[in-house]
Image: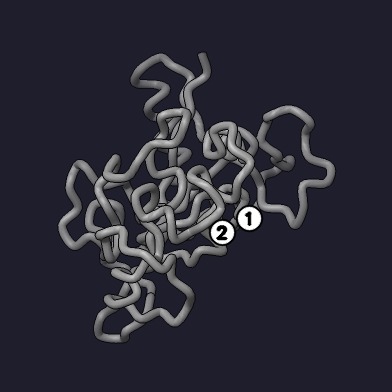
Amino acid sequence: GCRGWAPALSRFAEDPRRGWQNPALPVAPMDEHPVSCVSFADAQAYVQWLARETGERYRLPSESEWEYAARASTATLRPWGDSPEEGCGDANTYDLVADAAYRLGWPNSGCRDGFADLAPVGRFSANAFGLHDVIGNVREWVQDCATGSFAGRPRDARAWEWLGGCRNRVQRGGSWLTPPAESRSAFRNEAPVDERGDDAGFRIARDL
């Protein structure tokens, strides 16, 4: 199952028929779209499978690694600057196009990025590290357990995890339906490890 847009209800709802192979949005997923409707457990299973298949050390990034890569040496709210209105060439977030299609009732970016919902990867400008879609399109699972603050976390780039695991994990980057306040480098979201949403995916890292 996956939480997605239910046109008949005009809201987001759980749908047991949906999954990563047939998410609600887009209706016909293509190879160029990022995977969505995946839980933290699904993402973990994938990187473990990929590591076995390739012999390389693939994993989810830590929250610190993710933010370092997303910021790409910038100190602004977003990789392209502070203004959400200037980012429609850089990120697929909740813009005027999405607002016209979904009417979710929260602020939009004030510009048009050309997509009402999920966009193919690489359609927006890369950041200074050459990474596309770190802000917007799909929220990205990272390895860290969700916490209310950064106090007490490791001083290096390791993920903050607890013995025995944790119920909620961190998501970063915002998505096609997040308002400007959530579509920035520092914003943190948390979700249960078994939750699937049609605006949630993941990015992988490889140890060299």
Asked if one can make out residue 41 in the rendered structure from this viewpoint, the answer is no
Q: Using residue 196 as the reference point, say whether residue 149 is left or right of it.
A: right
Q: Is residue 49 above or below residue 119?
A: above
Q: Using residue 8 as the reference point, say whether residue 85 is left or right of it.
A: right
Query: Is the residue under label 2 in contact with that under label 1 (CB below 8 Å)?
Result: yes
The numbered disc on residue 192 is 2
Quadrant of residue 32 within the rendered picture: top left
Is disc 2 placed on a helix, strand or loop? strand
Residue at 39%, 44% in the rendered image: 133
Residue at 72%, 53% in the rendered image: 147
Marked residue nearer the N-terminal end (1 or 2): 1
* Quarter that holds the N terminus: bottom left
Say few, some or many: other residues with alpha carbon within 10 Å of mark 1 (under 14 / 14 to 19 / 20 or more): few
Q: Position of residue 24 (x, y in %)?
A: 26, 65
The answer to which of 56 and 110 lies nearer the viewer is 110
Image coloring type: one colour
The numbered disc on residue 154 is none
Residue at 56%, 38% in the rendered image: 71
Asked if one can make out residue 184 in the rendered structure from this viewpoint, the answer is yes
Residue at 48%, 19% in the rendered image: 57
Quadrant of residue 99 within the rendered picture: bottom left
Q: CA distance from mark 1 to mark 2?
A: 6 Å
Q: Using residue 24 as the reference point, say whether residue 82 is left or right of it.
A: right
**What amino acid type should be assigned to the residue bearing mark 1?**
Arg
**What amino acid type should be assigned to the residue bearing mark 2?**
Pro
Q: Is residue 75 above or below residue 58?
A: below
Q: Position of residue 50 (x, y in %)?
A: 37, 27
Q: Position of residue 15 (x, y in %)?
A: 32, 71
Q: Is residue 181 above or below residue 100?
A: above
The answer to which of 117 and 160 lies nearer the viewer is 117
The numbered disc on residue 167 is 1
The answer to which of 80 and 207 lies nearer the viewer is 80
